[in-house]
Amino acid sequence: MANEAVFKRYSGNPIITAKAVPRANSIHNSAVAKFGTGYAGIFRVDEQDMNFTLHVGHSPDGIHWDIEPNRLTMKSDNPDVTMTDHSYDPRITKLGETYYITWCNAGPQGPCIGLAETTDFKTFQQRENPLVTANRNCVLFPRKIDGNYASYHRPSDRGHTPFGDMFYATSPDLTYWGCHRFVFGPRGGWQSTKVGPGPAPIETKDGWLLIYHGVWTSCNGYLYYAGGALMDLERPWKVLYRTKEYLLAPTELYERVGDVPNVVFPSSAIVEGDMIRLYYGCADTCISIAEAKLSDVVAFVKTHSFTK
């Protein structure tokens, strides 16, 4: 099976552009979840003054979106824990009836992971930042592992990291995190510079399906691709299969041309039956979707994997 046969781009891509929010310079790298009879999302909006802000959006079908013009606000029990003006690249994970949002909550010390929760996408409670600076990507698992909350994260530095390994961590209460385990790092070709977790891991009978981004460096800068891995269900830091070939590459004009050219950045996945809809940022400018059969994605990961 060639990778072109796995994910099929939506003919109406991109589905969200800067026109959706006044004063937006771009809207990309955002998080979507099924909510009620439709969908809800947390959207990265880069404003015209180049502040990076988060906005709530709603959709009846996951394609046509109404995004709030005003930035999302959060409550916090600690005045020292706030959302910064450089809040970006959110992920959403649902556990029980609660939706947890992680994002890059960057400050003077560099990129940091923020954590908040909501049940209605109206009121948001911000928790303590789960990880120390510098860290750029984090996503929670949709169920506990061995009685603990779990996450994948990608330590960084204060700049645009020229390296990147992925780690697994656990917590008894979403506040205190530890037991960090190395997951995997860069490895040749399109993922030779850095890697990072994408949407919340998807549980399958073959293991946790992790869709991740991989980066390689060319004379034109950083190029971002989407790949897949299957991880052990009870020891999710153990790699069972990992794609040697990418699942999605920046080949379309809207993926190649933008504020940061040549980027596909997977950030959300909606699974219904055997269908998976992948939401991804394009060239740090807009949002698109691609769909595939979940079974085809799993089969591709297993048959296009690195040899041990």
Image (cartoon, grey):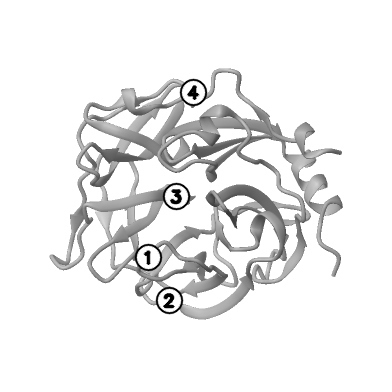
Residue 208 visible here: no
Q: Which residue is mark 3?
A: 91
Query: Which of the two labelled residues, at mark 4 and mark 2, occupies the earlier sequence position?
Result: 4
Residue 34: tell me if it is visible: yes
Q: Are marks 3 and 1 in contact (CB under 8 Å)?
A: no
Q: Earlier in the sequence, mark 3 or mark 1?
A: 3
Cα distance between the residues tagged 4 and 3: 18 Å
Residue 247 sits in quarter: top right
Regarding mark 3 in the picture, which secondary structure is present there? strand
The quadrant of the picture occupied by the C terminus is: bottom right
**Which residue bears the numbered disc 2?**
177
Amino acid carrying label 2: it is Trp
The residue at 60%/76% (across/down) is 182
The foreground one among 74 and 217 is 217
Helix, strand or loop status at disc 1:
loop
Looking at the image, is mark 2 or mark 1 earlier in the sequence?
1
The amino acid on which the numbered mark 3 sits, given as a three-letter code, is Arg
Q: Vertical placement of 38 versus 86: above or below?
A: above
273 relative to 296 in the view: left or right = left
How far is the residue under mark 3 from the one under mark 2?
Answer: 18 Å
Residue 300: give x, y in percent of width and height: 80, 46
Mark 2, Cα crowd under 10 Å, few <14 / some 14-19 / many 20+, is some
The earlier-in-sequence mark between 4 and 3 is 4
Q: Which residue is mark 1?
A: 159
Compared to 37, does 229 lie above or below?
below
The three-letter code of the residue at mark 1 reads: Gly
Label 4 or label 1, whichever lies nearer to me, is 1
